[in-house]
Image: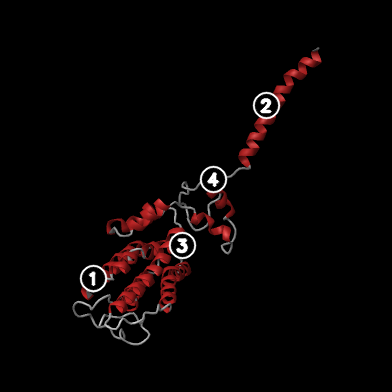
Amino acid sequence: MPLSKTRLEEGPEGLQFKCADATASTNRSSPNPPRSAGVGNADRGYLAEEGRAAAKAGTGGFWTVEYYQPYFDIDTKTVLQRCYMTLNPLAAPTYIPTHLTPADLYGPFWTLTTLIFALFLSSSLAASISAYLSADSEKFDYDFKLLSIAMSLVYAYGIALPVLLWLALRYLGVGEWSVVEAVSLWGYGQFAWIPVSVLCVIPVPIVRWVLVGLAFGLSAYFLGANIYPILASAEAKATRLLIIVLAALHLGVALSFKILFFGYYVVEKIGADIPIPGGDLPGTGGNSTAAR
């Protein structure tokens, strides 16, 4: 009996000790879920359980698909809100901490892809209507070279340029910006061109120039308001001159859109157009087809 009593008293104590040790061991062996590289200290609370599992798997090399999975786990409502806020100049200076935390790649991908098809379809549709309304009802053939041009131009400017800029800033010692934030910011910044590509069907040259200027101004201010503070944080003040280079590239893209895709007219254009050097040369899009 004394032996049995002793065992009964020691048993719960031993079990309690083992449970405490297991709990402590579990707490020590369960660190916080690792964050994927490229988002800094951004809160990823919007991810579901599957997204958190993907975030854990995303700790591999950047050349793996798993690394980018967390950046595509975002709802449509958030994507649309981020697109609309790019049109609000008052929200531009605080866009990254307020609306782009955490950064994603899903929205920029669809924004750029939608812009490509909007440029091609709007241009081709208006050119086909113009051919149909012409005096001899010209036969219209779709120029699929415009699609390849739009794809190369938009993806190069929306993806390749921010990656190159990020690499340059890393080389100059500016590490406050991640490559995902760079691509995400640039992708959302091109949203203003989507409605403009549709509205430029209006056959009034001055209206088209106003629309192109409006899209250029909104997107340029949006990008500048978010990029300049990062460039200004660099020790080398010469890095701020990059904003001039970026502004020149942005202007070049705007003029390319105007010449290649916004030069068609559904009916005879109203008013005189602004002459552009090289705008009437062969190979500039082939979509300036006015009704005769």
Q: Is residue 231 left or right of residue 210?
A: right
Q: Is residue 238 visible?
A: no
Residue 31: x %, y % from top left: 58, 45
Labels 1 and 3: the sequence-earlier one: 3
Farthest-out residue, front: 136
Q: Find out whether the residues at labels 1 and 4 contact each other: C-beta distance under 8 Å.
A: no
Give the spatial CA distance, label 1 vs label 3: 38 Å
> Which of the marked residues, 2 or 1, is nearer the chain's N terminus?
2
**Is 146 situated left or right of 10 in this image?**
left
Distance between mark 2 and mark 4 Cα atoms: 32 Å
How packed is label 4: few (under 14 Cα within 10 Å), some, or many (20 or more)?
Answer: few
**Which kind of residue does numbered mark 4 sit on?**
Glu
Res. 95 visible in picture: yes
Percent across and percent down for residue 16 are: 67, 26
Residue drawn at x 29%, y 58% is 88
**Amino acid type, label 2:** Gln
Of the numbered discs in the image, which one, if any, rests on residue 77? Answer: none
Q: Which residue is mark 1?
A: 210
Residue type (three-letter) at the residue carrying disc 3? Gly
Residue matched to label 2: 16
| Residue type, numbered disc 1 | Val
- List x then y, in percent, for residue 129: 31, 74
Front-most of 196 and 287? 287
C-alpha distance separating marks 3 and 2: 50 Å
Query: Circle 3 — which element?
Result: loop
What residue sits 38% from the left and 85% below the top?
283
First in sequence: mark 2 vs mark 4: 2
Dot 1: element = helix
Q: Quadrant of the C terminus?
A: bottom left
